[in-house]
Amino acid sequence: MRFIGIDAGITTTGICILQEDGTYEPIEVAAPETIKKSPDSIRFNWLLNSIEAAVDFGKEKSLYMFEDYAMWGKGQITRIAEFTGILKHRIYLSQRIRYGNLAHNRIFVCSPNTLKKFATGAGKGKKSLILKAVYKKWDFDTDSDDLADAFVLAKICQMLFLYTASLTAKADLKYEHECMVAILKQNKIERKQLLS
């Protein structure tokens, strides 16, 4: 099983593929300058193809965790939402070929505040706090906000799997457990619903 965290963006997308054994692969897909200046249809297609080549959506059993949209975000939020929706649909189609009707149970979202709280213990604060937290908490060293977020999303995804596999599973830290309860609610998942 792979747990894949995706911090989707229209310029740079951070991805972290976390395996069950704890090994991980951080991937940053950044559009080259020539693509950045292209219309969205060309840019999105280039990013989608690059992400799919890096992740191989149909390769093996995978669960995906996306950072949900920052509703208070400024500027590009509509374009990011459009791109993320297309990316989720591409993943869904690849997973549907492999898993049939269970494909809809493989893509989840986590609010930005919950992501911050899971990493730092507090749901508010500067984005740079996550960079420090992932190094301190998990020894993951990066200078990319996108990769740090993707790493945390992959860890959340892994814990979500554990929470649905057992009614008695509970995070070691109280604030992590609170995050998992919020994510279960946000994604309309019951504890007894296995995400295998």
Image (cartoon, rainbow, N blue to C red):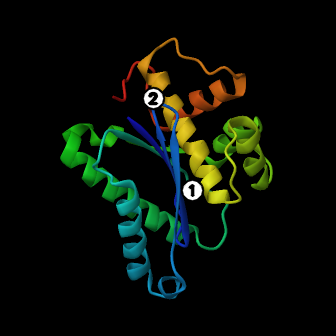
Tell me the number on the disc at residue 69: 1
Q: In the rendered view, does 175 fall on the left or right side of 6? A: right
Q: Secondary structure at mark 2?
A: helix
**Front residue of this view, candidates 134 and 181:** 134
Reading the image, the residue beneath label 2 is 161
Percent from the top left, x then y, of residue 89?
Answer: 33, 57
Q: In the rendered view, does 47 fall on the left or right side of 9? A: left
Q: Amino acid at mark 2?
A: Phe
Q: Can residue 53 be seen in this snapshot?
A: yes
Q: Tell which tag, 2 or 1, sits nearer the viewer.
A: 2
Q: Are marks 2 and 1 in contact (CB under 8 Å)?
A: no
**Quarter holding residue 42:** bottom left
Percent from the top left, x then y, of residue 69?
Answer: 57, 56
**Quarter holding residue 191:** top left
Answer few, some or many: residues within 10 Å of disc 2's Cα (few below 14, many 20 plus, some between 14 and 19): some
Image position of 95 with respect to 167: above or below: below
Q: Residue at x 57, y 50 (%)?
A: 150
Q: CA distance from mark 2 to mark 1?
A: 22 Å
Q: Residue at x 51, y 72 (%)?
A: 79
- Of the 4 image quadrants, the one containing the N terminus is top left
**Quarter holding residue 173:** top right
Q: Amino acid at mark 1?
A: Tyr
